[in-house]
Image: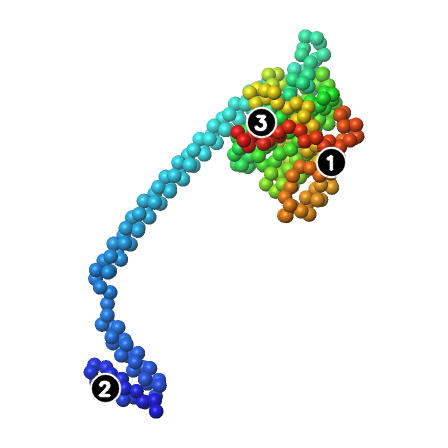
Amino acid sequence: DGTVLAGKGGQVKMTDGRDAAKEALLAAFRGIADGLGVPTHIVKIEKDLEAKYRAKNAVANEKLRKREEEQRQKEEIAERKRESEEEKLLAEVLNVEPTAAGQRMKTKAAVERFDVRSVRGDYIIVAPKVSDGWKRATEWGPLRLALAPSSTLQHLWGSFDFGVFEGMLRSSTPISPTSNMVKFLWRGRDTGTGESTYRPENITKFTFLPDGKFKGTMYWDCLGKFELAGKLDLNASHGLYSDDSVSGWKSQYHSLNDLNYERERVGRWGGGWGYGGHSEPESNSDTDGGRSDSEGGSEDHRDKRRKR
């Protein structure tokens, strides 16, 4: 009939109804629970463990802070060293003037004429707007650019790795022994997204100076027009960049075109990207004879940079 027996304080009381029974049971439980407590030695252990945790955590945080500070100082030292080296190279290059105004060489026999073969090799590049704008541009080492003439000496080709973007250069003006300024078009890729660029405004101009140096400008749509300077790295240039190298650069240069761009756009998220596919050689190529460049060439200097 819903009648229950509840006890509290030694007293027995008869109750009617379920709600009354619940209240009686809860009251009895509260009375028991009020008499219970956490033992003192357990409370002490808990406080001791908490104190040890806080102490060890403080030590660990201090070690982490010191490591981060040491790393920051190392990065600052490396950055100052890089900036100092760049400033030194820029000053060294930019303080050397062309042999004549207007970037034209005198044609007198006493003055050395521009020989396109003399600029073959690997160059250390300084481009402050690139290295200052993207920290990862120099994480693999200094910016690099390689140059080599075609087999007929009618064109100057190049390959560069500027960290955030890379590509190939092709001279777009006739090579003249009376001019030390060469204009290029370049095609390449954003190394982060893999997206290719082959715009007609991708123009580069180099003025070659004595002692294996050059200064110039380059246009990249992500940065605009920027200045750069280079110095021949004699150690890295020894025995490199033969006609096979030029063939490889040409093949990669010609593979950057509308058709391959569309193929890569469709498959970018699934198939990745690379140099290859449909190739479109220049109509005024001095070596292709209207054929596509299909030679693979020797190891690209951009891979060499990442292996250093």
Alpha-carbon distance for marks 2 and 3?
Answer: 97 Å
Q: Residues within 10 Å of mark 3 (few under 14, many from 20)?
A: many
Image quarter (top left, top right, bottom left or bottom right) of the N terminus: bottom left
Question: Which of pointers 2 and 3 indicates the residue nearer the eye?
Answer: 2
Q: Which mark is residue 279?
A: 1
- Going from the N terminus, do you reach mark 2 or mark 3 first? 2
Task: Give the SS element for disc 2.
Answer: strand
Task: Please determine whether, in this image, residue 146 is positioned above or below residue 64.
Answer: above
Which residue is depicted at the point 32% across and 85% down?
A: 20
Viewed as shown, does residue 212 lie left or right of 153? left
- Amino acid type indicated by mark 2: Val
Question: In which image quadrant can residue 59 be found?
Answer: top left
Identify the residue position indicated by label 3 in the image: 125
Viewed as shown, does residue 36 lie left or right of 268? left
Which residue is depicted at the point 40% across and 40% down?
A: 68
Alpha-carbon distance for marks 3 and 1?
Answer: 29 Å
Task: Please determine whether, in this image, residue 30 is positioned above or below residue 116.
Answer: below
- Amino acid type indicated by mark 3: Ile
Task: Give the SS element for disc 1.
Answer: loop
Which residue is depicted at the point 70% across and 44% down?
A: 263
